[in-house]
Image (cartoon, helix red, strand yellow):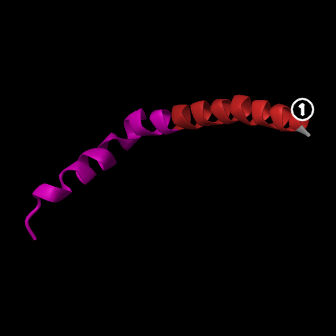
Amino acid sequence: MNETYSAVAGFAQTWGLLYFVVLFGIVLAYVFWPKNRKDFDDAAQIPFRED
């Protein structure tokens, strides 16, 4: 049983890290994509608008 746990834990750590690194890269690509700049600039100004 202990060997199975170690194998599963090793698999989860390795592939989980890879999954989150890829996900982080996708988020960064979305944030810094030139087409999205206007949307983020507009969202950044929301606190300064007077209704």
Residue 40 lies, with reference to residue 28, above or below; the image says below
Query: Residue 23, how many percent across, how many down?
Result: 58, 38
- Find the magenta span and give its range: 27-51
User: The C terminus appears in which quarter of the rendering?
Assistant: bottom left
Residue 19 position, x and y percent, is 66, 35
At 33% from the left and 40% from the top, the residue drawn is: 37
Crowding around mark 1 (Cα neighbors within 10 Å: few <14, some 14 to 19, many 20+) is: few
Give residue 40's position: percent from left, percent from top: 31, 46
Q: Which residue is mark 1?
A: 3
At horizontal 58% and vertical 30% (from top left) the residue drawn is: 21
Which residue is rendered at x = 89% and y = 32% of the image? 3
Q: Is residue 33 magenta?
A: yes
Q: Is residue 7 left or right of residue 41?
A: right
Q: Is residue 2 magenta?
A: no
Residue lying at the far front of the rendered structure: 2
Q: Amino acid at mark 1?
A: Glu
State the SS at label 1.
Answer: helix
